[in-house]
Amino acid sequence: MKFEIDFDSGIPIYIQLKNEIKYAIATGKIPPGSQLPTVRQLAVDLKVNVNTISRVYSELEKEGVLSTRQGKGTFVSEKNVMKTNGRNKERLDQLVDKLFIEAFELGFSPEELLEYIQRRFRLKTK
């Protein structure tokens, strides 16, 4: 399991990692029931503070994405709380609309935007 953090992005590390974990679960890279690295191990691997990892795991547990079993570790929840539902689709519509507006303001054509999204998707789902 490899997560990528961009220390120069300006996006807080915990948000990047939280999104990376959610993305890996949503795309099946980390299936339900899978054990995640320990807080300490992931902190060492990513070269970040253990409190950062602990915060991410805690927030994802509150959201129902992860579950912690005392003395056993942190696991992806068996029930898929990230399933697509009506509310999620509405949120995705909002995000896509915002992406369209921003991309067009930056000068991207619809074809360029679609090509870019497909390339990023392939890169992220390898």
Image (cartoon, rainbow, N blue to C red):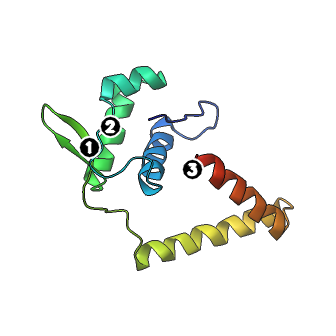
Hey, what amino acid is under mark 3? Thr
* Residue on which disc 2 sits: 36
Question: Could you say which is closer to the camera, residue 41 or residue 123?
Answer: 123
Discs 2, 1 touching: Cβ within 8 Å = yes
Q: Is residue 9 above or below residue 47?
A: below
Taking the image as shown, residue 87 lies to the left or right of residue 125, namely left
Taking the image as shown, residue 49 lies to the left or right of residue 102, namely left
Q: Residue at x 30, y 44 (%)?
A: 34
Discs 3, 2 touching: Cβ within 8 Å = no
Hey, what amino acid is under mark 2? Leu
Q: Is residue 106 above or below residue 2?
A: below
Within 10 Å of the Cα at label 3, are there few (<14), some (14-19), or many (20+) other Cα atoms? few
* Residue on which disc 3 sits: 125
Taking the image as shown, residue 83 lies to the left or right of residue 6, namely left
Image coordinates of residue 12 in percent, x first then y, are 52, 38
First in sequence: mark 3 vs mark 2: 2
Q: Residue at x 65, y 72 (%)?
A: 97
Within 10 Å of the Cα at label 1, are there few (<14), some (14-19), or many (20+) other Cα atoms? many
Image coordinates of residue 24 in percent, x first then y, are 46, 48
First in sequence: mark 2 vs mark 1: 2
**In front: label 3 or label 2:** 3
Image coordinates of residue 10 in percent, x first then y, are 61, 38
Q: Is residue 123 above or below residue 5?
A: below
State the CA–CA distance, disc 3 to disc 2: 18 Å
State the CA–CA distance, disc 3 to disc 1: 21 Å
* Residue on which disc 1 sits: 75
